Image: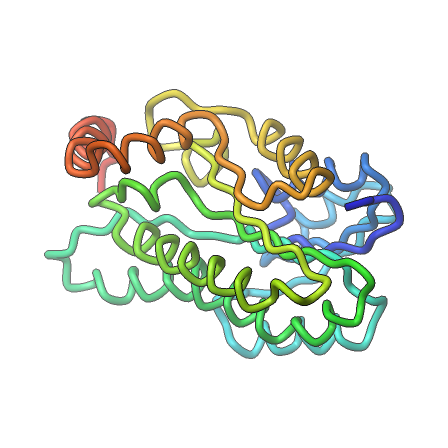
Amino acid sequence: MDLDGKFAVVTGGGAGIGLAITRALRAAGSDVLIVGRNEARLAAARGDDSRILTATADLANPDDRKRLVEQLGNGRPLDILVNNAGSMALIDLHDPNATSLLEHDVALDLTAPVHLCIALLPVLRQRPEAAIVNVSTGLVYAPRAFNPGYSTAKAGLHAFTRSLRRQTRRDPIHVFEVFPPLVDTEMTSGYGGPKIGPEVVGTAVVKALARDRTELRIGRAKFLYAMSRIAPNGIFSMINRATEKRAPAS
């Protein structure tokens, strides 16, 4: 896919992986609309780049998602949708508040990207060539027990992305899924262990778009994928033994 002159929307584009993807898309010649809750952070991410636009929205809120879809349906034709916004709460399932915390993770990590994919399909199908990029995680292969909302939502997003790719195989839409390992972002600041920089993900995503590589496993996510096929119970136990020792205090 030639990215020069394309118009992309990146959810959660004001920081972390989303900002890195935005910068990589801009370097490839795309114009980008970044979406996030924090207007000041979006403005800082935009800087003086007139080809980065901003939209303030809480994508866990259905009304905000509807407003974003209306904006995208009535504006410049959309070529690329990047579903990156996410939440990863530490949840003790014995906690009385566990359900509300889990519901928020599922709303942002699963319901929001599914809603945007379906609602924007008619827009994307009108383009000669379009792409949907869903940012998943290596944890779909070995879920972290103390992040049950995040792990559950991303597993669902993985299944949805495969279904979407199958159903759109005759459309001019390429459906990508990105599986990063632990990335050095604000969301993972309390977690130990080896991390990669978000710019590694951003660069890899743009290369995958250019090469039509629809499943992109980065770094240690490749190991998780391989081990999940060889010894699924073993890698699940290993991930959780290691991460329970490094888990942030609740």
- In the displayed structure, does residue 109 sit left or right of residue 46? left
Q: Quadrant of residue 38?
A: bottom right
- In the displayed structure, does residue 52 sit left or right of residue 19? right
- Where residue 208 appears, as percent x and y from the top left, is 65, 38
- In the displayed structure, does residue 153 sit left or right of residue 19? left
- Seen at 57% across and 73% down, the residue is 118
Q: Nearer the viewer, residue 6 or 86?
A: 6
- Seen at 75% across and 41% down, the residue is 25
Q: In which quarter of the image is residue 79?
A: bottom right
- Seen at 40% across and 26% down, the residue is 220
- Seen at 23% across and 36% down, the residue is 249
Q: Is residue 78 above or below residue 223?
A: below
Viewer can see residue 73:
yes
Q: In this view, does 93 lie above or below 27?
A: below
Which of the image's four quarters has the C terminus? top left
Q: Which residue lies furthest to the front in this view?
A: 170
Q: Which of 100 and 115 is in front in this view?
A: 115
- Where residue 66 appears, as percent x and y from the top left, is 61, 78
Viewer can see residue 11:
no
- Where residue 15 appears, as percent x and y from the top left, is 60, 41
- In the displayed structure, does residue 161 sit left or right of residue 27? left
Query: How many marks can you see?
Result: 0
- Where residue 40 appears, as percent x and y from the top left, is 67, 50
Q: Which of 32 and 29 is in front in this view?
A: 29
